[in-house]
Image: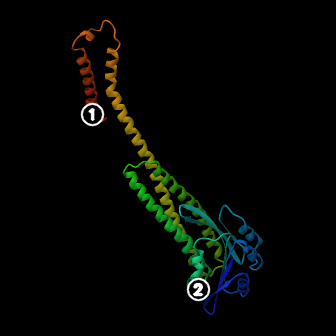
C-alpha cells in the first residue's frame, strides 16, 4: 500500500495508491510518502532511489545505519514496540530529502494508521521534512517507549514491595529476569539508534535548511533521555535481582543457623544416650534407682548451658 500526503493551496491532500502517489511525486511537491510491503518497486522506479538503498530495504539488517546519497539521506531504524507482554522490533527505512520524506516498512508499524488519520497534524509539519520525521517518531515510537518504561518502573515498584515483605517465590524471580531481559533488548536497540541519529544530524547539515536542524537535534535529545531512563531501569532491575539472590542466601543461612543450633544443643544429649545405651555389664548407674533421672537431668543441664552460652555470644 502506498499513501502520499502533499500540500496544495495550503491544504493537505491524500494521494492514495501508486498512480496518484506517482503523480504527486513527479510534481515535486513537498510530501510525505509511505510505502509498505511489495511496493518497494515504486521507490526504485518512480522515486529513482539508489539500488543499494533499495537492496537495504528489501532485507533485514542487524544494525541500524545512515548513508548519504547526495540529494537525500537514507537511514534504517529498528523501532521497539511492546505488544502485550511481547517486545517486537520493526524496521523503518527513511529517505530524507530537502522537500520530501519517504518511509518504507515491510509490514505495518503500530501507530502509523492513527498518523494517517490526523491530517491537520501532517499539514502543520509537512513543509519541513525533519519536523515531520520528529512528529512521526514522537507520536509512535517515543511515546510507546515512554509508556513502556513507566510500566516497567511500576512493575519494579511492585517487585520491590514484595521483596521487602520477604516474598522470595519463583514467580517473583521470573518477573525480575523477564523485566531485565526486555530492558536489555530495548537498550541494545537504543544504543545503535543514538549513534544513527547523531550521524543523521551530522550528514544533514548540507541537505537540511538551518531553521529545520533544531527538529533533528531535538530527536537526538529526546532519544538520549529515553536511553538514560532505560539505563537507570536496567540498573534498578539488576539491583532487584541481586537483592533477591542476597535475600535468598540470607534466608538459607538463617535456616542453616537454626538447624545448627538445634544440632549443637541436642548433640550432648545424643552422646549421653549413646554412652548409656552401650549396656556394658559394669555400668554402676544402670543398677541405681537414680540412674534414669540422672541421665535425663544431665542432658537438660548440658543443653541449657550451651543455650545460655550461645545467647551471651549473641549467636541466637
| Image point (64%, 76%), residue name | 205
Q: Is residue 225 visible?
A: no
Q: Is residue 312 above or below residue 94?
A: above
- Reading the image, the residue beneath label 2 is 123
| Image point (51%, 62%), residue name | 230
- Sequence-wise, the earlier of marks 2 and 1 is 2
Q: Quadrant of the C terminus?
A: top left
| Image point (57%, 73%), residue name | 111
Is residue 254 or residue 51 the one in the foreground? Answer: 254
Q: Is residue 224 above or below residue 156?
A: below
Local crowd at mark 2 within 10 Å, few (<14), some, or many (≥20)? some
- Secondary-structure class at tag 2: helix
Local crowd at mark 1 within 10 Å, few (<14), some, or many (≥20)? few
Q: CA distance from mark 2 to mark 1?
A: 79 Å
- Secondary-structure class at tag 1: helix
Q: Is residue 128 above or below residue 271?
A: below
Q: Which mark is residue 33?
A: none
Residue 139, picture quadrant: bottom right
Q: Position of residue 159 (x, y in %)?
A: 43, 55
In the visual, does 243 lie left or right of 97?
Answer: left
Q: Position of residue 194 (x, y in %)?
A: 58, 66
Q: Is residue 184 visible?
A: yes
Q: Position of residue 277 (x, y in %)?
A: 34, 15
Q: Is residue 230 above or below residue 221?
A: above
Which residue, as the protein is rendered here, is positioned at the far top? 282
Q: Quadrant of the N terminus?
A: bottom right
Which residue, as the protein is rendered here, is positioned at the far left? 290
- Reading the image, the residue beneath label 1 is 311
Amino acid at each position: 500500500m502506498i499513501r502520499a500526503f502533499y500540500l496544495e493551496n495550503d491544504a493537505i491532500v491524500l494521494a492514495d495508491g501508486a498512480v496518484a502517489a506517482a503523480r504527486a511525486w513527479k510534481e515535486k511537491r513537498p510530501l510525505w510518502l509511505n510505502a509498505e510491503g511489495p511496493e518497494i518497486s515504486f521507490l526504485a522506479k518512480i522515486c529513482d532511489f539508489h539500488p543499494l538503498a533499495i537492496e537495504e530495504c528489501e532485507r533485514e539488517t542487524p544494525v541500524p545505519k545512515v548513508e548519504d546519497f547526495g540529494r537525500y539521506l537514507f537511514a534504517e531504524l529498528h523501532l521497539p514496540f511492546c505488544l502485550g507482554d511481547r517486545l517486537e522490533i520493526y524496521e523503518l527505512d527513511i529517505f530524507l530529502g530537502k522537500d520530501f520524506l519517504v518511509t518504507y516498512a515491510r509490514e505495518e508499524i503500530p501507530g502509523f494508521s492513527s498518523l494517517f488519520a490526523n491530517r491537520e497534524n501532517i499539514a502543520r509539519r509537512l513543509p519541513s521534512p525533519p519536523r515531520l520525521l520528529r512528529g512521526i517518531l514522537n507520536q509512535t515510537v517515543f511515546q510507546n517507549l515512554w509508556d513502556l518504561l513507566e510500566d516497567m518502573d511500576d512493575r519494579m515498584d511492585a517487585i520491590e514491595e514484595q521483596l521487602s515483605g520477604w516474598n522470595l517465590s519463583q514467580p517473583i524471580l521470573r518477573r525480575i529476569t523477564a523485566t531485565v531481559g526486555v530492558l536489555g533488548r530495548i537498550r541494545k536497540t537504543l544504543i545503535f539508534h543514538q549513534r544513527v541519529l547523531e550521524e543523521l544530524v551530522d550528514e544533514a547539515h548540507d541537505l537540511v535548511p538551518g531553521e529545520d536542524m533544531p527538529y533533528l537535534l531535538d530527536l537526538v535529545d529526546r532519544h538520549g533521555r529515553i536511553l538514560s531512563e532505560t539505563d537507570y531501569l536496567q540498573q534498578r532491575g539488576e539491583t532487584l535481582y541481586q537483592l533477591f539472590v542476597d535475600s535468598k542466601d540470607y534466608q538459607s543461612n538463617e535456616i542453616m543457623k537454626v538447624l545448627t543450633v538445634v544440632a549443637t544443643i541436642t548433640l550432648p544429649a545424643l552422646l549421653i544416650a549413646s554412652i548409656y545405651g552401650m549396656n556394658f555389664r559394669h555400668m554402676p548407674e544402670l543398677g541405681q534407682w537414680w540412674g534414669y533421672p540422672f541421665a535425663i537431668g544431665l542432658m537438660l543441664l548440658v543443653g541449657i548451658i550451651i543455650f545460655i552460652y550461645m545467647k551471651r555470644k549473641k549467636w541466637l
